[in-house]
């Protein structure tokens, strides 16, 4: 069984930051840009864990209709690409 030395943990230099969320954007060149952004209304790790544990939680800032429309547009673009094999589509 592993043992931990509290002194080593306290002096290791490890710091904890506010929980972040993944964020992607598509720039004007069509490249996907990934970043981590602060989670709204989540400043403590306990709140983050509770949020992740509740599978039915959807942020109020999410526009479900826009997401569905964007997915349809993306799917149509993918289907129209000739260099993508039928198997990949």
Image: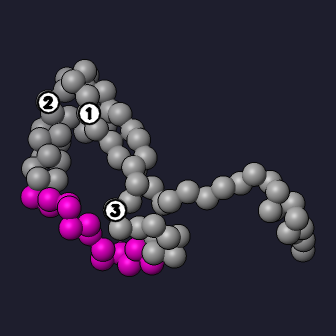
Residue at disc 1, secondary structure: strand
In the image, 88 versus 25, the foreground residue is 25
Q: Earlier in the sequence, mark 1 or mark 3?
A: 1
Q: Position of residue 35 (x, y in %)?
A: 41, 41
In the image, 31 versus 45, the foreground residue is 45
Alpha-carbon neighbours of circle 2 within 10 Å: few (<14), some, or many (≥20)?
A: few
**Residue at the image point whose x is 11% and y is 41% from the top:** 73
Q: Position of residue 65 (x, y in %)?
A: 9, 58
Q: Is residue 78 magenta?
A: no
Check residue 26 in the rendering and tell me which mark sits there, or answer none. 1
Location of the C terminus (image quadrant): top left
Q: Nearer the viewer, mark 2 or mark 1?
A: 1
- Mark 3, residue position: 40
Q: Position of residue 1 (x, y in %)?
A: 90, 74
- Mark 2, residue position: 80
**Region in magenta:** 50-65
Q: Are marks 1 and 3 in contact (CB under 8 Å)?
A: no
**Residue at the image point whose x is 35% and y is 46% from the top:** 23
Alpha-carbon neighbours of circle 1 within 10 Å: few (<14), some, or many (≥20)?
A: few
Q: Is residue 62 magenta?
A: yes
Tell me how far mark 3 sits from mark 2, CA to CA.
37 Å
Q: Earlier in the sequence, mark 3 or mark 2?
A: 3
Alpha-carbon neighbours of circle 3 within 10 Å: few (<14), some, or many (≥20)?
A: few
Residue 55 is left or right of residue 63, and the answer is: right
Q: Nearer the viewer, mark 3 or mark 2?
A: 3
| SS assignment for the magenta stretch, majority | loop
**Residue at the image point whose x is 36% and y is 75% from the top:** 55
Residue at disc 3, secondary structure: loop
């Amino acid at each position: 069984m592993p043992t931990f030395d509290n002194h080593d943990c306290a002096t290791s230099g490890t710091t904890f930051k506010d929980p972040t969320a993944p964020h992607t954007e598509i720039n004007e060149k069509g490249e996907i840009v990934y970043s981590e952004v602060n989670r709204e209304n989540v400043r403590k790790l306990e709140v983050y864990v509770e949020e992740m544990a509740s599978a039915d939680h959807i942020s109020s800032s999410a526009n479900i209709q826009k997401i569905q429309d964007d997915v349809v547009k993306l799917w149509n673009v993918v289907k129209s690409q000739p260099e993508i094999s039928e198997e990949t589509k």
